[in-house]
Image (cartoon, grey):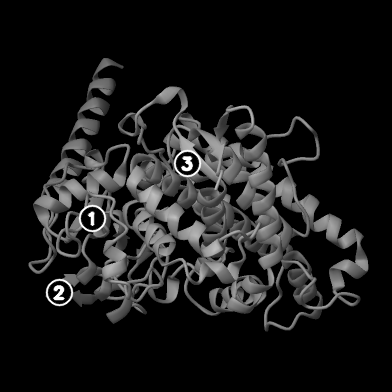
């Protein structure tokens, strides 16, 4: 028995040494991009810190703006310059229009049935078209003007209650409520305050934070398949299943409410402007006019996409914008002067007023430059061999575009670490809509985020009202330099700690 155990142990050691040898001496194509040394089995995974965008920035400083890493057995191309991003998302956009698969996306995003993670192809084109035409087009976004104004006014009224007694305001919570309420009203038909119908149900804020953190997690089994069992041991699978079920139960309830209001779901007695997004999806399913059946799983995936993305990435822009304004009183004062001069003695700001607020738009652009909501964008995958900047990139290579690093590139921006909205007054033609690759917080090309107009309409009206109605200070006479800038973890990067401030009414 002892000899058998020794033989078995020697066999295991031999297998391990063979694996180490194979991983240590894996040949890399002569024309591959620069690549840091990798370890056996795990490749470069050990070089990723908690803040992956910062870890990749540090590596790119040593190895260049086009860098090849290995996450386990998966080759990963890291893009860290505007020029390289242009090659990926414009010159070779079609080649890089697919998405990599992962257990996390499979579980949380209904097996890739949503717009963000769906494989490139006819299904993706059809469902993206549905979302754009019925929720995210310029025409539809303009039609939601009244909803944005009403919910912004509700937020301002809530802040006024605090300002009358100089109490501390949790702006982060108010921003989540604002964006959540706008999205719920236009996409789901009414406001929902929590994930279930009970008063003690988990709030959307809590669930969205957990959802985003999980989406940004690394599942070792995606890169080293024979270690997939670790996700069962460390609890990742259980967390994924729990969050997925919580969202699924909520979406079942939303859909059932629409079905129960028969005529409301069909749209027969409502015009186009009155129907919400769920109405539209159920009507499309009933008519079966897409060339494929839009099943209930796809409907839930699309609702989840619009709801989660519409809330999470939108409110983080407001959160970071107010954070930077509080850190830079001169910029805050300049923005207040612009808004107050344009609005004058009118009691309310209209969306027409926003067209004249050029400094406001510059503040938002500068915030997006330094704090892109999803700093590494959503990963892509090559569908065929391709040459980028003279380097050979193999098919099935994952691609990570570090929008956070690109926004801080000294080749594109003077003093890139400084918060300076004036740079976008000087270069007012630079925009975030996917044509200027030095500013791509929402991506570019075919897989650009389709909700840019929707998100920015909320951000502009909300930020204008905040600086128009109130003056702002940190609690306890804290200095602006004392403001904690620590980032959260996850797919979307928020402040780690809520933004708490003191508001006082504008007396002018």
Badge 2 density bin: few <14, some 14–19, many ≥20, Cα 10 Å: few
- Give the mark, 1 or 2, whose residue is nearer the N terminus: 2
**On the picture, is 475 further left or further right than 155?**
left
Q: Looking at the picture, does residue 215 appear above or below residue 486?
A: below
Label 1 sits on residue: 408
What is the CA distance from the residue labelled 1 to the residue labelled 2? Answer: 22 Å
> Which residue, as the protein is rendered here, is positioned at the far top?
2
Give SS at disc 3: helix
Badge 3 density bin: few <14, some 14–19, many ≥20, Cα 10 Å: some
Residue 455: x %, y % from top left: 54, 61
- Give the mark, 3 or 2, whose residue is nearer the N terminus: 3
Label 2 sits on residue: 389
**On the picture, is 269 further left or further right than 61?**
right
Q: Which mark is residue 486?
A: none
What is the CA distance from the residue labelled 3 to the residue labelled 2? Answer: 34 Å
**On the picture, is 263 further left or further right than 396?**
right
- Residue at 26% x, 43% y is 45
Label 3 sits on residue: 213
Badge 1 density bin: few <14, some 14–19, many ≥20, Cα 10 Å: many
Say whether marks 1 and 2 touch (CB < 8 Å). Answer: no
Say whether marks 3 and 2 touch (CB < 8 Å). Answer: no
Q: Is residue 103 visible?
A: no
- Residue at 56% x, 59% y is 461
Give SS at disc 2: loop
- Residue at 11% x, 47% y is 37
Q: Looking at the picture, does residue 133 appear above or below residue 476?
A: below
Give SS at disc 1: loop
Question: Which of these two is toward me, 447 or 229?
Answer: 447
- Give the mark, 3 or 1, whose residue is nearer the N terminus: 3
């Amino acid at each position: 028995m002892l000899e058998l155990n020794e033989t078995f142990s020697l066999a295991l050691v031999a297998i391990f040494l063979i694996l180490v040898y194979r991983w240590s001496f894996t040949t890399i194509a002569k024309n591959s991009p620069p690549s840091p040394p990798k370890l056996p089995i795990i490749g470069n995974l050990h070089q990723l810190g908690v803040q992956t965008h910062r870890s990749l920035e540090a590596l790119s400083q040593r190895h260049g703006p086009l860098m090849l890493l290995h996450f386990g057995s998966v080759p990963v191309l890291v893009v860290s310059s505007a020029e390289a991003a242009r090659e990926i998302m414009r010159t070779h956009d079609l080649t890089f229009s697919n998405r990599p698969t992962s257990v996390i996306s499979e579980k949380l995003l209904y097996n890739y049935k949503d717009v963000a993670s769906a494989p490139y192809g006819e299904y993706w084109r059809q469902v993206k078209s549905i979302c754009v035409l019925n929720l995210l087009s310029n025409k539809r976004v303009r039609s939601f003007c009244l909803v944005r104004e009403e919910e912004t006014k509700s937020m301002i009224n809530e802040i006024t209650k605090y300002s009358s007694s100089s109490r501390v305001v949790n702006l982060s919570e108010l921003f989540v409520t604002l964006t959540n309420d706008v999205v719920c009203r236009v996409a789901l038909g009414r406001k929902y305050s929590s994930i279930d119908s009970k008063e003690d149900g988990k709030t959307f804020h809590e669930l969205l934070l957990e959802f985003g953190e999980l989406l940004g997690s690394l599942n070792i089994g995606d890169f080293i398949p024979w270690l997939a069992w670790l996700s069962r041991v460390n609890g990742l699978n259980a967390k994924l299943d729990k969050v997925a079920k919580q969202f699924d139960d909520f979406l079942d309830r939303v859909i059932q409410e629409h079905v129960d209001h028969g005529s409301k779901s069909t749209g027969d007695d409502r015009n186009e402007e009155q129907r919400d997004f769920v109405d539209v999806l159920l009507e499309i399913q009933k008519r079966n006019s897409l060339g494929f059946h839009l099943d209930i799983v796809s409907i839930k995936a699309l609702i989840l996409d619009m709801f989660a993305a519409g809330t999470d990435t939108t409110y983080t822009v407001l959160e970071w914008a107010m954070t930077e304004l509080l850190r830079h009183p001169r910029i805050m004062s300049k923005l207040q002067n612009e808004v107050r001069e344009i609005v004058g003695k009118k009691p309310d700001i209209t969306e027409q007023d926003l067209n004249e607020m050029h400094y406001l738009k510059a503040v938002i652009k500068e915030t997006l430059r330094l704090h892109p909501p999803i700093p590494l964008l959503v990963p892509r995958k090559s569908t065929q061999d391709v040459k980028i900047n003279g380097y050979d990139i193999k098919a099935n290579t994952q691609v990570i575009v570090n929008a956070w690093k690109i926004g801080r590139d000294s080749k594109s921006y003077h003093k890139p670490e400084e918060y300076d909205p004036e740079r976008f007054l000087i270069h007012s033609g630079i925009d975030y809509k996917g044509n200027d690759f030095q500013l791509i917080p929402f991506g570019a090309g075919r897989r650009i985020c389709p909700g840019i107009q929707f998100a920015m309409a909320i951000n502009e009206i909300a930020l204008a009202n905040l600086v128009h109605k109130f003056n702002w200070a940190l609690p306890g006479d804290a200095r602006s330099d004392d403001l904690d800038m620590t980032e959260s973890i996850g797919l979307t990067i928020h402040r780690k700690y809520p933004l708490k401030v003191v508001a006082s009414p504008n007396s002018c």
